[in-house]
């Protein structure tokens, strides 16, 4: 391995993957605005804000490599310090994660109406966001690579809190989804799909955060963790966009064998973030309608 592979090489490779994820993000944003032109204004503004943050983050990450390899190439003093672009990357990555985690926490609350669990989720999200900002501030105070030991506590708080928030949000969504009871195959299939989506999206961000933390603890002066970190903000925004873009509206008809002559019509409507489950059972003179509104 060359002398610069773990320093400049890791940063360069990180920008490559960041660029690929950013292009995927742009495609998802286009899909969102074209598929849901009448979506809630709050969602539209959130998507636009996240795209702006990630655009600045991607430009900043490219600036990191440009300053090290072009502008200050041969300047040994500059190569030994973390310039303004590193704390900027930390702050923007934390902001992207904060927006996504708040969105998912709000989604859980709309589904469960559980204030206690939602407050806990928001608290872990705030700890992660504050941790990223404090970490960026610490880099400003101790910019040399040899001083990175000063960041161990703040990096650990940021990434552990972020991973914890991701896992807790996914677990809360799964728990709420599993509490929905239905005798209709279409509804059970939808719940299973939503459960898998919650697990997958939560796993992607939490695993990446843990990878960043592991590489940082192994070698604080290596930029491998920064290379992975360049992609962190984009992965969070993509998680939010995937959740927004996978919404559908469908209708499932099924028959119940419990009572002879009884039919079941199960309407599944997923608008902005809502799943509307309506069961209509009609049997003889006594008709019965059961309706459940679930927001996810």
Image (cartoon, helix red, strand yellow):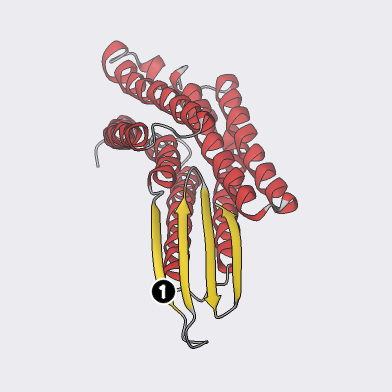
Q: Nearer the viewer, residue 74 or 207?
A: 207
Q: Is residue 101 left or right of residue 194?
A: right
Q: List x then y, in percent, for residue 33.
A: 36, 31
Q: List x then y, in percent, for residue 169.
A: 58, 52
* Residue at the far right in the pictured view: 116
* Residue at the far front in the pictured view: 285
The residue shown at (43%, 44%) is 239
- SS at badge 1: strand
Count up the numbered dots. Answer: 1
Q: List x then y, in percent, for residue 190.
A: 43, 63
Quarter of the image for residue 235 reads top left
Q: Nearer the viewer, residue 48 or 220?
A: 48
Q: List x then y, in percent, for residue 97.
A: 51, 37
Residue 181 seen anywhere in this rendered image of the structure = yes
Q: From the image, which quarter does the N terminus lie in?
A: top left
Q: Estimate how packed mark 1 is, as few (under 14), some (14 to 19) or many (20 or more) residues with alpha carbons within 10 Å.
A: some
The residue shown at (46%, 51%) is 270
The residue shown at (48%, 56%) is 198
* Residue at the far top in the pictured view: 71
Residue 3 seen anywhere in this rendered image of the structure = no
Q: Nearer the viewer, residue 199 or 188?
A: 188
Above-or-below relation of 99 to 124 = above
Above-or-below relation of 255 to 257 = above
- The residue at which mark 1 appears reads as 254
Q: Nearer the viewer, residue 89 or 107?
A: 107
Quarter of the image for residue 232 reads top left
């Amino acid at each position: 391995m060359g002398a610069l592979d773990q320093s400049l090489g890791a940063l360069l490779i990180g920008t490559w993957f960041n660029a690929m994820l950013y292009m995927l993000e742009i495609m998802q944003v286009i899909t969102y605005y074209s598929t849901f032109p009448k979506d809630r204004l709050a969602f539209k503004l959130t998507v636009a804000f996240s795209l702006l943050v990630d655009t600045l983050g991607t430009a900043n990450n490219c600036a990191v490599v440009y300053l090290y390899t072009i502008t200050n190439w041969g300047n040994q003093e500059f190569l030994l310090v973390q310039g303004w672009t590193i704390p900027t990357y930390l702050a923007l990555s934390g902001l992207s994660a904060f927006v996504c985690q708040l969105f998912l926490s709000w989604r859980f609350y709309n589904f469960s109406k559980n204030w206690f669990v939602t407050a806990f989720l928001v608290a872990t999200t705030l700890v992660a966001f504050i941790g990223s900002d404090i970490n960026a501030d610490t880099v400003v105070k101790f910019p040399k690579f040899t001083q990175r030991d000063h960041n161990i506590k703040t990096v650990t708080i940021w990434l552990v809190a972020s991973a914890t928030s991701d896992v807790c949000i996914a677990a809360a969504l799964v728990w709420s989804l599993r509490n929905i009871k239905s005798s209709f195959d279409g509804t059970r299939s939808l719940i299973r799909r939503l459960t898998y989506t919650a697990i997958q999206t939560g796993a992607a961000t939490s695993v990446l955060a843990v990878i960043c933390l592991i590489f940082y603890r192994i070698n604080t002066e290596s930029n491998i963790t920064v290379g992975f970190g360049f992609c962190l903000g984009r992965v969070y925004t993509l998680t939010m966009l995937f959740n927004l873009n996978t919404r559908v509206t469908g209708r499932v008809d099924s028959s119940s064998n419990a009572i002879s002559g009884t039919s079941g019509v199960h309407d599944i409507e997923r608008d902005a973030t809502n799943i509307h489950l309506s069961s209509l059972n009609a049997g003889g003179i006594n008709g019965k309608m059961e309706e459940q509104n679930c927001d996810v």
